[in-house]
Amino acid sequence: MLAIGDGSSTFGRIGIDRGRIEKVLPADGPSDIPLPPGTIVAPGLIDVHTNGVADLTFNRDQGGAVAVAAAEYARMGATGFVASIMTAPWESMLHAASEVAEAAHELEGGRPIGARCLGVHFEGPFLNAKFRRIHRNEWIAQASAERAREMVDACGGACVMVTLAPEADGASEAARVFLENGIVCSAGHTSARYREGMLAIGLGYRSLTHAFNGMPPLDHRDPSILAAFIQDRRTLVHVIADGHHVSPVMVDILYRTLGDRVVLVTDFMPLVDPGYRIEGGVVRDEHGTIAGSALRIDQAVRNYMSYTELPFAQAIVAATYAPARLLKEGERIGRIAPGMRADLSFWDETYQIIGTMVGGEGVFGTILGQPTAA
């Protein structure tokens, strides 16, 4: 079965030429890669919010974490990820982003070894201190157009998303710089209510970082920024579907409200700090504050299916075409269609990953001639 990425499915084969999907063929006929019975082929997964992999973070290990993440994400069926740089001392953030961008560029120039690093996501430092969570208060910075330009320049064109609090002083000026450079402005770690959310969307924000987390609750009398992003159909909303950051019933309600505008993310946090630990299914700091998840992106899809009772072909949209649209890459990745990159994930009948293909090259799975051992 082919799960197309737009919610539909069909039985067929995929013709690939020079790293792109040339055509979708009838199911009957010869194939260069015989697949086990019951195999499901879907677009490759895309995680737009991850802080690292294994025991490496993009803040600390910088470019060195990119190749490791590429290989590890391929084992999850992911063909793309966005490296998140968290709030840190200003020069440290810029340096980490520069190193990650350079490493991603170097990998892009060679034969695929795993998932592609699709760019840099700055989570901070223009956040609301009240909703900073583990982002250290002394590193939260005053937003300005000048600082925004420094962030853009540090990435050399690789910055694809910035999470910032739209109500923060100077945030509007910074956001204009990001938007002028084609960068997604994502509201997060914010105290904003509905009206401020609508103003942010009017300015150009199209994304909301980890719904329900790092923001006021969705109150029925004084609705939060989440209500604005739910209501305006131009936006997409991230959710961490680990069952802990957001309860399964609220994930289901979010889907019923947003439909194909839900974007599954992991916000994966390596256990690099001595005070970090996995407790209650999430990563927490020494004070018990949630620091991120221990979630894999393929498990996020399985959880999403369970929470929403969606069939695979519909659930997969939230981890393929929705994040591709968020990154303004929906014409290149995230679906199985002629002209799209041949970035594919292969699943067995129990929805476990058995293979991953990037640009028409097998990067994981014995069915594609690659080892499956970690």
Image (cartoon, helix red, strand yellow):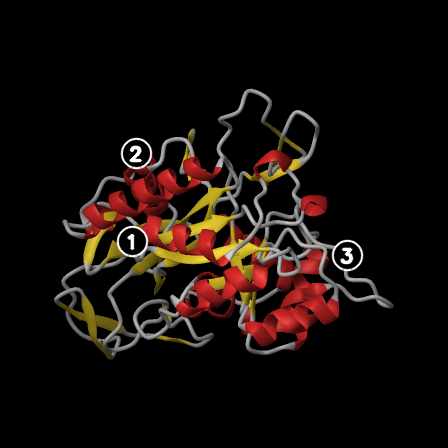
In the rendered image, is residue 238 in sight?
no
Residue type at tag 2: Gly
Query: Residue at 57% across / 53% down in the picture?
Result: 303
- Using the numbered discs, state the Cα–Cα distance from disc 2 to disc 3 in whole angstroms: 38 Å
Query: Residue at 58% across / 56% down in the picture?
Result: 209
SS category of the residue bearing label 3:
loop
Quick one: label 1 or label 2, which is nearer the N terminus? Answer: 2
Percent of width and height locating residue 189: 64, 51
**In-image side of 145 versus 111 (left or right):** right
The residue labelled by disc 1 is 156
Residue type at tag 1: Gly
**In-image side of 192 versus 81 (left or right):** right
In the rendered image, is residue 267 in sight?
yes
Outermost residue, right direction? 221
At label 3, counting other C-alpha atoms closer than 10 Å, the crowd grade (few under 14, some 14-19, many 20 or more) is some
Quick one: label 2 or label 3, which is nearer the N terminus? Answer: 2
Number of marks present in the image shown: 3
Residue type at tag 3: Pro
Answer above or below: position of 199 versus 348.
below
The residue labelled by disc 2 is 64
The residue labelled by disc 3 is 217
Query: Residue at 16% across / 66% down in the picture?
Result: 31
SS category of the residue bearing label 2:
helix
**In-image side of 112 versus 264 (left or right):** left
Percent of width and height locating residue 232: 63, 77
Answer above or below: position of 270 versus 219.
above
